[in-house]
Amino acid sequence: MFHTSSSATNFRMLVWWFLGMVGAVTISKGLARECDDFTRLHFHNSFIGTSLRVRFLLYTRANESCGLELSHHNVSETALFNLTRRTAFVIHGYRLTGSPPIWLDEIVKKLLAQEDMNVLVFDWNYGAANLNYLIAVRNMRKAADNATAFIQQMQENGASLSSIHMIGVSLGAHLAGFVGKKFKNSKIHGKIGRITALDPAGPEFTNNPPEDRLDVTDAQFVDVVHTDMDALGFRAPLGHIDFYANGGADQPGCPKTIFSGKQYFICDHQRAVYLFLCSLDKDCNITAYPCSSYDDFLDGKCTQCDTFKPAPCPILGYYVTEWKDTLLQLNQTKAFFSTTDKNPYFKTYYQVDIVPWNKPIRWGVLTIKLHNGTDVAEAKINHKSTKFEQYKSTRMLAQFDKNLQTIQKISLQFSTGNVAGPSYKLRLLRFQLRSLEHFDRPVLCRYDIILEDNVDVSFRPIPCETSDF
């Protein structure tokens, strides 16, 4: 009988353990193979130009850290690609430097953490990496044809179009749109399930008709995040719901001058990706408020979402489909929210109602601080000077960068902005604070408060009287 030495066996076991730990192999039809990684190019590739070459890299819970390149002509080649599961396509955009997207590994892992699905990274770096953006745009449309043919094969092998979710970044958002058009214009195939567009590209697409860009009709459900609409992104609404972070343009924490280098150009544009990634975390629920404009949102005119179900206001990102039925009925909705400068990004919203006593009209800004004994949350309502008129309820939106569970003390400061002029006072008959997200929290009030210009006034809030609701 043949006996293998224990030292040789242990050595082979050690090798296989090491390869498994680093994610260097995956099993397909019983054969070991190396991982297929996203195409890595360099700036000199962009400088000389690249011709289109498309790759489909499959990730599942069985090969989460090790991509498997799929055949363009045989989608059933590997048992890892289970066509009865949901399939998410991750589609990058223009790649000036040719390097892989820095967020790619994170989005794959976080998508697989949500459910047992197929994640297909659509790698068209050859074609997207080009110094000439116009060539990349032309290549993108050819890449969309390739993706369409692949999805047709999926459908022929049992996949449902409704189970397909295309997540497109920048130029990749329009690529997803062109794929969707191919199916919706065919009476045989129908519509793909969902397109998520993360700051769709603006250059070469702004003012285009629907057939030449992403459009709300390109999928059964289209959700869009805008973060750089005044530069690299698209301004107008494109989906069933369009989320405008901080108004859709300048993002907190992003450089304001060209001296910051590369980040000056890409920070706002990439923020849409990081907001979507945040939505895949359990502790990141960014509430957005349907509204006609960001100014109206900041003015507190859009704090009610009575028509939305299952919860009053939609949540940004992956799980916005919980509001799908309502959004489809409304056809197109714009929703606004503000963020902090880093993950988890969300702010805590309160509605403030003030009834002034002063007979002369006062103009100014209000700073509110909430204290819980150990921590302080601050909101400065200063996007414009607010009008305070006698006996007239003035409603404002207060956005706090911290979420305090309990409020023991409130501090108010009224400022007119006068430097050399007279100092004014603002007398309040009533101050009311209501949480817009935590309905179980009590509505807090205080009555008869005198605020001097630029002076903090602190008080302990009390539950509001029933007549104040």
Image (spheres, rainbow, N blue to C red):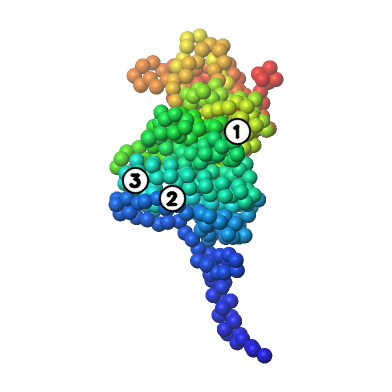
Find disc 3 in the rendering and name its residue.
262
Residue 343 at least partly seen: no
10 Å neighbourhood of mark 1: few (<14), some, or many (≥20)? many
The quarter of the picture where residue 310 lies is top right
Residue at 56% over, 46% down:
152
Question: What is the three-letter code of the residue carrying label 1?
Answer: Pro
Residue 440 placement (x, y as % from top left) = 68, 32
Of residues 224 and 182, which is closer to you in this image?
Answer: 182
Looking at the rendered image, the disc whose residue lies closer to the viewer, 2 or 1, is 2
Of the two numbered discs 2 and 1 on the same chain, state the one appearing first in sequence: 2
40 shown above or below 362: below
Q: Which numbered marker is on residue 66?
A: none
Q: Quadrant of the N terminus?
A: bottom right
Name the residue nearer the viewer: 415 or 174. 174
Residue under label 2, please give it: 124
The residue at which mark 1 appears reads as: 314
